Image (tube, rainbow, N blue to C red):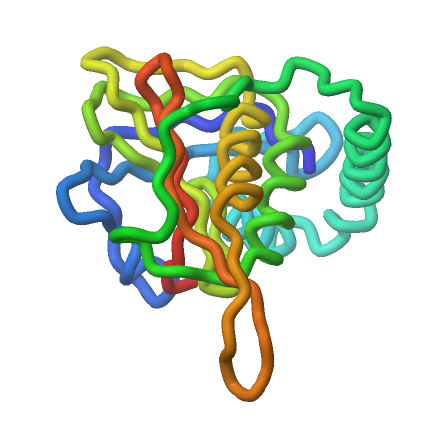
Amino acid sequence: MRLYYALFAAAPLFCNATEIDAHIEGYGVVVPEWEVEVTSGSTTVLEGTIEEIHEELLQLNPNWDEEYMSNFTQAAADTEKRDSDKHLFGRTNFNGAKHTCRGRWPECHPAPIVRGVEYLRYVQGKPKNGPGPGNCGRVSCSNNAAIWWCNDNASSKTLNGFGSIADGAEYITNKCTRWGWQNGGYRSFVSGQVFHSTKWNVIVRKDKC
């Protein structure tokens, strides 16, 4: 998915069918804006999660998947290979980071989070979030499972890449996934929050989407 950057605009989050639960009590909420290539040489700015952006892209260009998603699939495969070879290029270090599992965050199923992590690793550019503390944007949400990132600095925060957010979400899934009984079978669940030493954090939680 050729997404060049996201800017977390200082705007209220409008509630609609997919965003009605997109809020966190005690935190400020902003909407990500993404500059995306719709057709070769033509870009536009869209708002929402990475999954919502994908749906809008298909409306603007019904052939978008054929033209761009093959690149995403290959990139995801390359990422998996790099990980298996233990070559963690430019990964954000969360080792020993303060984190909480579950707590105030409702649990979701891990599979959509893993898919969101894959998407975020392919996004180009540097995410920027407005002044905090507790300034948050929901960057991924599908099947009622969401990834948020929050800035706790008093000034704006720019990360090295969207992979940094993905690293935080992956850390949470590794530390906080549990198995439990639901609907007649054992299923996996996850939620949590991890705090980076440079005053930003990532949340994985159940949301309505």
In the image, taking residue 134 as reference, residue 146 lies left or right, namely right
Residue 139 visible here: yes
Q: Residue furthest bottom?
A: 184
Quarter of the picture containing the N terminus is top right
Q: Which residue does the image show at 61% across and 31% down from the upper left?
A: 3
What residue is shown at x 50% (from left), y 80% (from top)?
A: 182
- Using the image, determine if residue 144 lies above or below residue 174: below
Is residue 138 visible in the rendered image? The answer is: no
Residue nearer the viewer, 204 or 95: 95
Judge whether 165 appears above or below 205 on screen: above
Q: Residue at x 21, y 22 (%)?
A: 132
Q: Position of residue 152 (x, y in %)?
A: 25, 22
Q: How many marks?
A: 0
Question: Between residues 175 and 84, which one lies in front from this camera angle?
Answer: 175
Look at 56% across and 64% down and name the residue there. 188
Judging depth in this view, the residue of 57 and 101 nearest the camera is 101
Residue 85 % position (x, y): 85, 25
Residue 146, horizontal then vertical, whole percent: 44, 51
